[in-house]
Image (cartoon, rainbow, N blue to C red):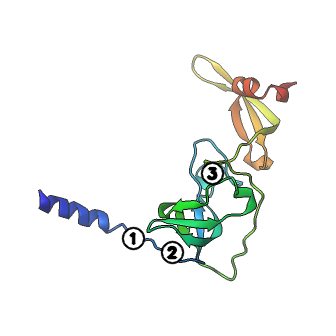
Amino acid sequence: MKAAQDRQASYANKRRRPLEFHVGDRVFLKVSPFRSVMRFGCKGKLAPRYVGPYEIVKRIGPLAYRLLLPTELSSLHDVFHVSMLRKYEPDPSHVLGTDEVELDQSLSYQEYPLQILGRKEKQLRNKTIPLVMVQWSKHGRQEATWEMEEKMQREWPHLFE
């Protein structure tokens, strides 16, 4: 039994790497993925998985670090597990732009529809589903999505007046 455990541990440990940061290092912070939430200008799998970089202010323990967060993230607790961080490798040609995004406790933000851009009906075998193309806040027309008209009328009735 011990030999089997050691063999499996050696397979698993090949992919593991110890993460350790120092005070003053800059790190990216992982944004928790949520289904059907558009984050930071992109939707779906093209949305960024990390935001930042932020500076490490203090090491709390072997696996926790305190970050210096900007004022728009002041509602978040500033101590994060090492698994939520990724080291920032500085590059002189890398220009970082900061957009004002209000995040909640789960590191996501709420979006609301701005306008309806179009309508269509999707024909299934036995029924027809009416769809509307919706432009969301903080996104352009090229990132508009097709949503079910019934759901949009229920949640956002002012768009149909």
Give me the residue at 79% from left, 45% from top: 137
Q: Would residue 37 be visible to someone looking at this image? A: yes
Give me the residue at 26% from left, 64% from top: 11
Determine whether, in the image, residue 58 is placed left or right of residue 5.
right
Q: Alpha-carbon distance for marks 2 and 1?
A: 13 Å
For the C terminus, which image quadrant?
top right
Label 1: which secondary element: loop
Residue 17 disc label: 1
Relative to residue 52, is residue 160 depicted above or below?
Answer: above
Label 3: which secondary element: loop
Residues packed near mark 2 inside 10 Å, few (<14), some (14 to 19) or many (20 plus): some
The disc, 1 or 3, on the residue closer to the chain's N-terminal end is 1
Residue 4 image point, x, y percent: 15, 59
Residues packed near mark 1 inside 10 Å, few (<14), some (14 to 19) or many (20 plus): few
Residue 155 or residue 128, whichever sits in front: 155
Residue 120 or residue 70, whichever sits in front: 70
Q: Nearer the viewer, mark 2 or mark 1?
A: 2
Question: What amino acid does circle 3 point to?
Answer: Leu
Residue 21 disc label: 2
Residue 9 image point, x, y percent: 24, 63
For the N terminus, which image quadrant?
bottom left
Give me the residue at 35% from left, 66% from top: 15
- In the picture as drawn, the residue positioned furthest to the top comes out as 126
Q: Report which residue position mark 3 lands on.
A: 107
Q: Nearer the viewer, mark 2 or mark 3?
A: 2
Residue 6 image point, x, y percent: 19, 64
Question: What amino acid does circle 1 point to?
Answer: Arg
- Residue 100 position by quadrant: bottom right
- Residue 37 position by quadrant: top right
Whether the residues at callouts 2 and 1 have beta carbons within 8 Å, the answer is no
